[in-house]
Image: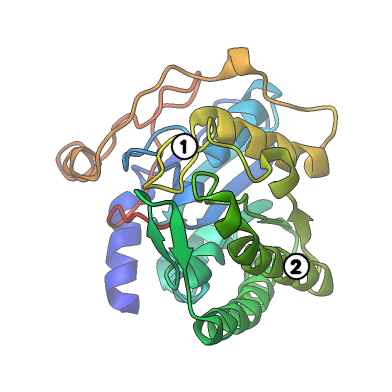
Amino acid sequence: MKKMLGTLIILFISFGSITVDAKGTEVYLALGDSLAAGQTPNRAIDTGYTDLIAQKLTTTGQLAFYSKALAFPGYTTADVLESIQTDEAKELLKKATLVTISAGANDLLQMVQVNSTSGSVAYQQISADFALNNARKNIAQIIKEVQVLTPKAKIYVMGYYFAYPHVRESQKSGIKKELDRLQLILKKQSEANGATYVSVEESFGVNATTLLPNPADVHPTMEGYRIMANAFFSQYNKGIFVTQSELPAPNPLSFEQILNASKEEGKSPVAKSEGMDNYYSLTELKPLI
């Protein structure tokens, strides 16, 4: 598995990274699942919260380098932990001064069955408990290993929003309880291991159907990603925020388009954020985060 991960990372490093022609000092690496990669509600890839963070740091003159070559849709905490243990990932991470981590949701959501037609949601409590315990252990280890690889980097662990605003009201409380447990795990493990936790759930609430418009998918719109980016900046620097006017025009690409472009050209624009053309990484699109 590590050999395959290393091959994928090599394939996407040049495609999924940018060096900015500026005097900035931040070397920003985004780790995690499809939220870090920028997956849309329609199973494409476009500008996500990590891209908006990098875009804003570019405009403020703070960014020197950015990569989301370690962000893969569908990744659990175990997957993220394994991905950062490859030689290619270690080479990237040792230069980082800023790291964001999105991991944990897929550990839980893969245990959840949702019927988007009826608005029902079901899961087994024992399976949820087991998944959350694994997430607790793995997120702590991810933070620790990143700290070893890049001891001077600022590490931010991103929280999650309520992923099921379209389900019936009577169905929301049970799954919200489990997602709240996940948030608490991420917060406690961040604080216990020297990272900063970024809360986003309150900004979304439980009825964010406009931010999560597809009842059959759990990914947000670009506006949702803007909210996540601003939640990060509320912890990083409260004087910085992304306005709606700064959002780039939508430019969603399918996995096939991205993979073909990366193989044939070595690089290709994924999201046309001003001053940032070449970045991206993923393995395959999955309906989970």
Badge 2: how crowded within 10 Å, few (<14), some, or many (20+)?
A: some
> Which one is nearer the viewer's eye here, 282 or 231?
231
Image location of residue 29, percent across then percent down: 56, 51
Name the secondary structure under disc 2.
helix
How many numbered discs sit on the rendered protein? Answer: 2
Q: Quadrant of residue 88?
A: bottom left
Q: Which residue is mark 2?
A: 184
Name the secondary structure under disc 1.
strand
Which circle's residue, 1 or 2, is located before the other in the chain? 1
Image location of residue 232, percent across then percent down: 72, 42
> Which one is nearer the viewer's eye here, 280 or 203?
203
Look at the picture and state if 221 lies above or below 133. Answer: above
Single out the residue that lies furthest toward the top: 245
Image location of residue 217, percent across then percent down: 39, 47
Q: Which residue is mark 1?
A: 18
> Callout 2, which amino acid?
Leu
- The residue lying at 33 percent from left, 38 percent from top is 42
Image location of residue 136, percent across then percent down: 65, 78
Q: Position of 125 compared to 86: left or right?
A: right
